Amino acid sequence: MEISAVDALLCPHCGLGFAAPLPEAGSLVCEGGHSFDIARQGYLNLLTGHGTKFVPDTAAMVGARDAFLDAGHYQRLGEALADAVKDHLCTPGDEPSLIVDAGTGTGWYLQQVLSAIGEENTDGTVAAVGLDISKFALRRAARRNPEAVNIVWDLWRDLPLGANTADVVLVVFAPRNAGEFARILKPGGVLVVVTPLPQHLAEIARDAGMLGIQEDKESALVHSLAAEFEPAGSRELLIPLRLTPSDVGNVALMGPAGHHLDPVELGQRLAKLPALTSATAAFRISVFRALSTHP
């Protein structure tokens, strides 16, 4: 774990910081003496109390997502995200930069960002924290990004990070806790949000059992963040795809619809598809700046 990332964390019990873990340490201990085990897979569970009302992604959903992303279908999105993030990181010689990936999932998008900035991060000036509610996802995220601090957390709760600690908060198809994102961002830091456009994968939406995308999603996004953030730019990204039935099945299972799909019915749908189906992935990458800083 990068020490600069650990330094940004706060104990969910007492609000104090954490001591730097020793190499191969099996736990993280805060200044108040509260201890949290580091799972053998490398992630950290800081959830306390009542837990969460949200249903985490299952092992099957996580596996489908990794298979689809590892096939390279969204590589251009990963590259575009890296470009959006790099412009807002501290330059070498400044204090360390911190990326917080809120809803990191299997860590694939964060991996693309960190890999892209790797040549510019030879002195270790960029650290990362990945947050997600699914232990199944974080097991994979910890393998992909072993230097990041990967944490089981509910994004709708107060985040276990200090105020003014993050340079970039990255949110890819995940919940947006505007107040907390604004609190943890440094002055001048940015929130980078990825959302699907209404036409996203429209060609396979029915066969994949995907949930509908609201037509006014952009205005709804801006409105939901308006109390804390102002828009600072956006771009649309269209990616032509050629998908096998297996790819379509992974798309079906990797998103929110994966919680509800009937595997037998899905298999019947996939059996009727041709060897390759054309589709277009359509995204908007939006950048926001906080209206004010938090003490």
Image: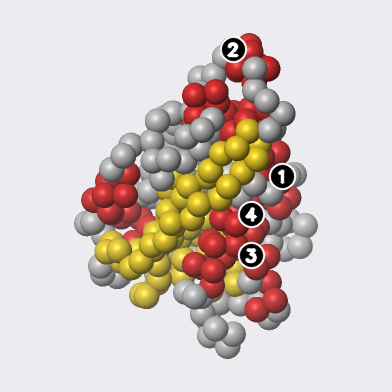
Among numbered discs 2 and 4, the one appearing first in the sequence: 4
How far is disc 2 from disc 1 in space, using C-alphas? Answer: 24 Å
Q: Position of residue 132 (x, y in %)?
A: 53, 44
Direction from residue 244 to residue 234 in the image, left or right: left
Determine whether label 4 and label 3 are within 8 Å by CB.
no
In the image, is residue 234 above or below residue 177?
Answer: below
Residue occupying image coordinates x 29% and y 70%: 293
Residue topped by disc 3: 114
- Asked whether 31 or 53 is in front, the reply is 53
* Residue 30 located left or right of residue 287: right
Q: Amino acid at mark 2?
A: Glu
**Label 4, label 1: how far apart the Cα atoms are:** 9 Å
Residue assigned mark 1: 71
Instruction: State the residue in front, 120 or 241.
Output: 241
Residue 75 shows which numbered tag?
A: 4
Name which of mark 4 and mark 3 comes first in the sequence. 4
Which disc is residue 265 wearing? Answer: 2
